[in-house]
Image (cartoon, rainbow, N blue to C red):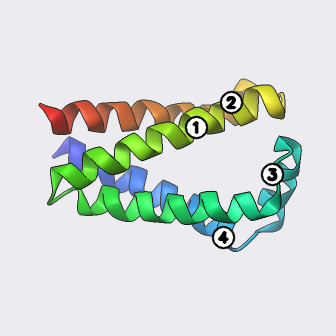
């Protein structure tokens, strides 16, 4: 039961982040400019995040969707940590959500493969 709650919370968090990117909310655009990536890439990442969130939610009933979506989220979060640390030189406070999502995706992968 705890893993289902974790899956739902993670999926909602990623879904909100994806929509924030897709809608180009001003604070996200400002952050994205610090990362020095083009704005069209923000839309691509936002779309992938929405798909990942749907996959993680669907993974409650199909563990293969959970694993695939969690692997994709893991890759996204490695990229996010890199962008925060090396491209924008942000503090640990700004990196923490990406690290938590990274760890959560690893937990979901392990849980669904065993």
Real-space Cα separation, disc 3 to disc 4, in angstroms? 12 Å
Nearest-to-viewer mark from 1 and 4:
4
Nearest-to-viewer mark from 1 and 2:
2
- Residue drawn at (61%, 57%), measured in percent from left and top? 45
Quadrant occupied by the C terminus: top left
Between discs 2 and 3, the one toward the N terminus = 3
Residue 58: image location, x then y, percent: 25, 63
Between discs 3 and 4, the one toward the N terminus = 4
Real-space Cα separation, disc 2 to disc 4, in angstroms? 21 Å
Real-space Cα separation, disc 1 to disc 4, in angstroms? 18 Å
Say whether marks 3 and 4 touch (CB < 8 Å). no
User: Is residue 101 among what the camera can see?
Assistant: no
Q: Which residue is mark 3?
A: 32
90 is higher (above) or lower (below) than 53: above
Q: Which residue is mark 2?
A: 82
- Could you tell me which secondary element the residue under label 2 belongs to? helix
């Amino acid at each position: 039961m705890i893993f289902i709650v974790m899956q739902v919370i993670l999926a909602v968090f990623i879904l909100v982040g994806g929509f924030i990117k897709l809608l180009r909310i001003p604070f996200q655009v400002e952050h994205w400019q610090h990362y020095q990536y083009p704005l069209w890439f923000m839309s691509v990442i936002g779309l992938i995040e929405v798909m990942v969130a749907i996959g993680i939610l669907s993974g409650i009933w199909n563990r293969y969707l959970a694993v695939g979506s969690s692997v994709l989220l893991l890759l996204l979060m490695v990229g996010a940590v890199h962008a925060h640390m090396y491209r924008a030189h942000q503090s640990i406070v700004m990196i923490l959500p990406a690290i938590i999502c990274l760890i959560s995706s690893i937990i979901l992968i392990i849980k669904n493969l065993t």
